[in-house]
Amino acid sequence: MPQQDTLFAGAFAGGSRFERENQALEREGQSVMTQHIGELNPPVRLMLTPGPSSIDPRVYRAMATPLVGHMDPWFKGCMDETQILMRQIFQTENRITMPLSASGSGGIEASVLNTLEEGDEGIVAVNGVFSERMYEIAKRASSEVVKVEAPYGKPVDAEDVRRAGKGKRIKIIGLAHGETSTGVLTGIDAYRQVADELGALLIADTVASLAAVPLDVDKQRIDICFSGSQKAISAPPGMSPITVSPAAEEVFRKRKTKVQSWYFDLTTAMNYWGKDRLYHHTPPISLIFALREAMRLVVEEGLQARWERHRVNQLALIAGIEAMGLDLLVKHPADRLPTVTAVMIPSGIDDAKVRNQLLDEFNIEIAGGFGAVKGKIWRVGLMGYCSQKPFVLLFLAALEKCLLDQGFRVPSGAGVGAAIRSYSQVETAAAVSR
Ligand SMILES: Cc1ncc(COP(=O)(O)O)c(C=O)c1O
């Protein structure tokens, strides 16, 4: 379990609305050249968002350790350890396994730009903003890429992808394992089968699912799998772990044209992360320290235990949400992404007012919807360090207060009560099976 040391220590420092307004007033009318900027003092938020998530104090400590050079022999050893941890979390022996110096979107760019050349056919399963982003990036690499869609709140049926690819030379099939914009989980295995039938590489965006949801890159034969440091791994944003199968490496070798992006050319980037350790670009060393520590904590907890923690905490959150009389966007329980719960905003409730109140009164950040579900849902993230019982109970109590203040009738303590019962059931079942 994560440590809870200091999450709320000095929670409101520098973060209250009063303080923000005062600072803005002080600056008003002053020349930019004479304005004094004080020491950085961010508030300590509880980030129950779809990412980034709050991080363990041990990860902060790792990030603040002394800088070393990226060609320092000691750092090269640290790179080895980082890659070992990453392989353990992806569950892969792939040679190309490294953190890209980029946010999760860099993982999308690298995956599709290294595989696709103009004229190549491909399919992206689109059921939200992030899978749409993969489609958009893939389309820029080859005009022959098509999308197969599902309504928001549902996974794309692999059968529809099979139909769309029939009779074509499909080079890649891409999907978002966890679609963060709607909180939908898509099963990988049916897609693998379709990719095998069509002779295509399978690309999975696991930005919102790696280290929280069962995933085994080698067993599930995912050809390119990438993630983001800031979600269930619980490191700061800015790195995108990626892994590439030997079959995908073979496709890279057979390219007729150079990869459009120099920065995201995985073959040359791997000259630095491979055995030669040749300079490619200067990586964000302190972020690598943080990522290494965050991944060490993942492995220390154990993948199975971590998946179970995410599952149990989401079940309790959902029990609480439903007991308060609220609905979920994703109707089918098997389609729910354990890290992101999409809650329908009840009619008559002011979306922004609730989110501002959570921030100002309780120091909790959640996210609204975007794309087609903007203004219709709240997205509550329970990922990595944030997937904890105390945070679930605190959030439900805080949400009840915000809803009551807007006249929404919630039976007193209903959310917290239902969540506690959900936890008790899981604990009883575990005790019985021991
Ligand atoms: C599923 C998914 N893919 C890709 C991204 C893009 O990642 P980033 O914002 O780190 O570039 C996100 C970000 O939320 C995501 O949730």
Image (cartoon, helix red, strand yellow):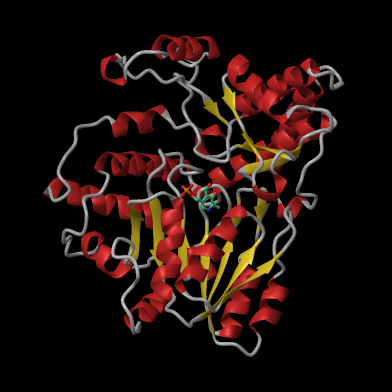
Question: What residue is shown at x 42% (from left), y 74% (from top)?
Answer: 115
Q: Residue at x 83, y 30 (%)?
A: 323
Q: Residue at (35%, 70%) from the top-left corner? A: 260
Which residue lies at the image location 65% right of the left edge and 49% below the top edge?
A: 371
One can see residue 28 in this view: yes
Relative to 400, say whether 256 is above or below. Answer: below
Residue lying furthest bottom: 167
In percent of width and height, residue 240 lies at 40, 52
For residue 222, say whether it is visible.
Answer: no
Is residue 10 shown left or right of residue 397? left
Residue 355 percent across, percent down from the top left: 65, 26
> Along the horizontal axis of the image, is 192 left or right of 376?
left
Image location of residue 372, percent across then percent down: 70, 50
Residue 310 versus residue 99: which sits nearer the camera?
99
Q: Is residue 394 above or below residue 376?
A: above
**Looking at the figure, which quarter contains the C terminus?**
top right
In percent of width and height, residue 285 lies at 25, 43
In front here: 250 or 388?
A: 250
Query: For the image shown, how many numbered marks are present on the structure?
Result: 0
